[in-house]
Image (cartoon, rainbow, N blue to C red):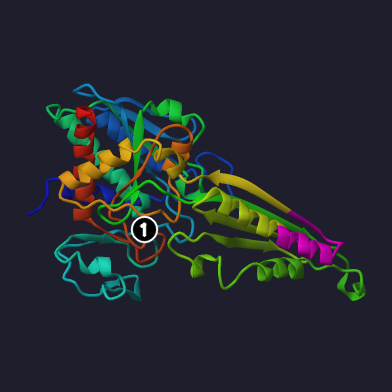
């Protein structure tokens, strides 16, 4: 039997996913890409049309709106981000719906060699009979986080159309640039005006997450000595060789993304560019604990210092910048928002799961800035690549959980 939310969620995600809104870490603007405004303007207009109040698009690229309360209670925020990940092609997305999934391998029309198999993805095997949404094979889908956008919008419309549902004031927010760690402006906590909030940016049904990585980024600049190669003996210092030595000296069998899981952190070289005269290496540093993160930063500095000492004619600069911190540090002081979400999931027949996020959300920054913001499931799977998929019925479960959560918050 189809849930009353299913068709709306399907239509919204298919429509939203087809809009290019990929973020770009190299661009200084906010949002980082002009195409994100296509989503932001659309959501602003849809919120006005459905009757939301206080609808605005801020000058830092966030859509905000109010769903009026019908009972006393705290103001609860629900957030999702409009940008899609820069790690894979996100232009020209062609979403497709697989109705009543039969349990077999899924192939892709634009890349026949690509296969999504339940043998390799056990969660897919649990979705027989569900309606699945994927892309066509050459792009990601963008369910991260347009599934969250669709869920928040569907919840908002439902609450506006049903004033008999007792709930306190609801604030919704759609942010840009979450995928590049720039989704939360310093002004957002005050503008959100929520006592606590939730990001709809999680995966498997039941996930209620209150732990995230702590994160820094690092930029290492290696400046060599440039001279004509024909007269370079004992004079040239090749920055490429030194940059390669830094990467090779760092741990390879441990402390990289491909060798870690669970609560292990890592040092990840994301980009290396330049030439023989100067090279720039970009890293992200991740750990669940502050001291572990600091130790990884110190290790990177030590490696740079050792390579510098071996070649004093070069100049090696290692700069480390904070990104976000594990939201557990603040949420564990008052678990009320987490317990409310767990109770709402249980009321919808879902067993809550709390596992550490091997990443971060806008909630990591918001929590650190004073708005407690755990993360709630959407159903998205295989994100940031061409195998990305989601179940419409999982999205409907998330939507019902959010509606129930809003009611429970008002009851105190």
Horizontal side of 267 relative to 169 (left or right) equals right
**Picture quarter with the N terminus:** bottom left
Relative to 329, say whether 171 is above or below.
above
In the image, what residue occupies the spot 37% across and 52% down? Answer: 144
Q: Residue at x 64, y 54 (%)?
A: 297
Between residues 282 and 305, which one lies in front from this camera angle? 305
Who's the residue at 23% across and 37% down the image? 405
Residue nearer the viewer, 322 or 20:
322
- Is 406 drawn above or below residue 392 in the view shown? above
Where residue 147 sits in the image (x, y, percent)? Answer: 30, 50
Q: Residue furthest left?
A: 1
Residue 300, above or below 337: below
Whole-percent x, y for residue 119 in the image: 27, 76
Viewer can see residue 318: yes
Q: Tag 1, which secondary structure?
A: loop
Q: Magenta segment: does it hold 381? A: no
Q: Which quadrant of the figure contains the C terminus?
A: top left
- Give the x, y percent position of residue 116: 30, 71
Counting from the top left corner in percent of width and height, residue 135 is at: 32, 62
Residue 285 in the figure: left or right of residue 55: right
Res 279 visible: no
Q: Which residues are magenta?
A: 302-317
**Residue behind mark 1:** 93
Residue 61 appears left or right of 53:
right
Exactly how many numbered labels are in the figure?
A: 1
The crowd level at tag 1 (other Cα within 10 Å; few <14, some 14-19, many 20+) is: many
């Amino acid at each position: 039997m189809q849930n009353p939310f299913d068709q709306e969620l399907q239509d919204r995600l298919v429509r939203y996913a087809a809009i290019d809104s990929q973020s770009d870490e190299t661009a200084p603007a906010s949002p980082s890409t002009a195409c994100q405004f296509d989503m932001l303007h659309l959501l602003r207009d849809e919120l006005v049309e459905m009757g939301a109040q206080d609808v605005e698009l801020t000058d830092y690229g966030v859509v905000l709106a109010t769903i009026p309360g019908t009972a006393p209670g705290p103001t609860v925020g629900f957030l999702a981000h409009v940008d899609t990940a820069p790690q894979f092609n996100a232009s020209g997305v062609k979403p497709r719906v697989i109705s009543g999934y039969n349990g077999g391998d899924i192939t892709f029309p634009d890349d026949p060699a690509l296969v999504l198999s339940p043998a390799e993805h056990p969660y897919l095997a649990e979705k027989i009979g569900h309606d699945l949404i994927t892309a066509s094979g050459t792009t990601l889908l963008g369910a991260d986080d347009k599934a969250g956008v669709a869920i928040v919008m569907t919840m908002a419309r439902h609450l506006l159309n049903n004033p008999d549902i007792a709930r306190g004031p609801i604030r919704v927010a759609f942010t840009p640039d979450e995928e590049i760690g720039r989704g939360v402006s310093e002004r957002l906590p005050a503008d959100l005006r929520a006592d606590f909030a939730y990001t709809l940016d999680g995966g498997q049904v039941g996930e209620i997450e209150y732990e995230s990585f702590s994160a820094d980024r690092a930029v290492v600049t290696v400046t060599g000595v440039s001279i004509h190669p024909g007269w370079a003996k004992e004079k040239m210092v090749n920055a490429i060789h030194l940059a390669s030595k830094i990467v090779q000296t760092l741990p390879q069998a441990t402390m990289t993304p491909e060798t870690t899981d669970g609560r292990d952190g890592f040092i990840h070289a994301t980009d290396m560019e330049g030439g023989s005269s100067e090279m720039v290496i970009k890293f992200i540093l991740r750990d669940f604990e502050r001291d572990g993160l600091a130790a990884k930063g110190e290790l990177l500095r030590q490696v740079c210092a050792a390579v510098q000492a071996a070649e004093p004619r070069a100049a090696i600069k290692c700069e480390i910048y904070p990104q976000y911190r594990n939201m557990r540090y603040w949420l564990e002081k008052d678990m009320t928002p987490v317990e409310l979400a767990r109770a709402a999931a249980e009321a919808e027949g879902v067993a809550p799961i709390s596992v550490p996020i091997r990443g971060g959300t806008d909630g990591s920054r918001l929590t650190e800035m004073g708005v407690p913001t755990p993360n709630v499931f959407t159903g998205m799977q295989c994100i940031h690549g061409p195998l990305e998929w989601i179940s419409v019925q999982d999205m409907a479960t998330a939507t019902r959980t959010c509606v129930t959560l809003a009611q429970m918050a008002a009851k105190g």
